[in-house]
Amino acid sequence: MVELLVVTIILSAVLAGLTTAFVKGSKAELDANRRVQAQLQATAAFDRLRRDIHCASSAMVSGATMTLSGCGSGTVSWCAVGGDSRYALYRLAGSTCDSTGKLYADYLISSSVFTYTAPVATTSLATVRVDARVNVNPSNALESFELTDDIVLRNSVRA
């Protein structure tokens, strides 16, 4: 009976260790998958943003919303919607934007995504700076992923 009790205790300790290892491994895999998905979404959003901005002739940035006009499909708006260090990037046809638009990227940690720079004299076209910081776990800054680009409005008019 004593041997059976000792074997049961040893087996329980080994199984507890294995169970803990499997649970931690599953959580790490889930977290890694979420980070990769968020990064892929942000990269896809940048591709679409580039196409929209390159095509536009004018842009207006107001807070977390950017409105582009002058492209063949009319006016398009992009906006960062959310709060408490988790924002999502949406695209919507028209001059207003909200969470009813198409979701392009999630887990942005700031709503300050767009900065417009007007054309300078006759030397440059208008540009939009897009700065998207992505983090599925904002409490850990080491897991941040940042995409930044200055995109030219190719159809804008030099001042």
Image: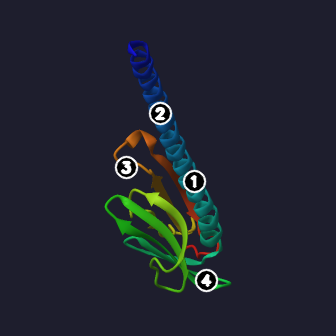
Compared with residue 131, is residue 98 higher up or lower down, i.e. above or below?
below
Give the x, y percent position of residue 51.
Answer: 65, 68
User: Alpha-carbon neighbours of circle 2 within 10 Å: few (<14), some, or many (≥20)?
Assistant: few
Amino acid at dot 1? Gln
User: Alpha-carbon neighbours of circle 1 within 10 Å: few (<14), some, or many (≥20)?
Assistant: some
Please say whether residue 159 is visible from this viewpoint: no
Towards the viewer: 17 or 55: 17
* Quadrant assignment for the N terminus: top left
Q: Which residue is mark 1?
A: 37
Q: Measure the alpha-carbon separation of dots 2 and 3.
A: 28 Å
Circle 1/circle 3 CB separation < 8 Å: no
Give the x, y percent position of residue 34.
Answer: 52, 51
In what element is the residue under mark 4?
A: strand
Picture quarter containing residue 69? bottom right
Camera-near label (4 vs 1) is 1
Towards the viewer: 13 or 63: 13
Towards the viewer: 28 or 6: 6
Q: Measure the alpha-carbon separation of dots 1 and 3.
A: 16 Å
Q: Which residue is mark 2?
A: 19
Q: Which residue is mark 4?
A: 70
Amino acid at dot 3? Pro
Q: Earlier in the sequence, mark 1 or mark 3?
A: 1
In what element is the residue under mark 1?
A: helix
Give the x, y percent position of residue 53.
Answer: 59, 70
Camera-near label (2 vs 1) is 2
Can you name the residue that lies furthest to the right here?
72
Report the side of 74 relative to 7 (left or right): right
Q: Which residue is mark 3?
A: 138
Camera-near label (3 vs 4) is 3
Residue at coordinates 53% horizontally, 54% vertically from top-left? Answer: 38
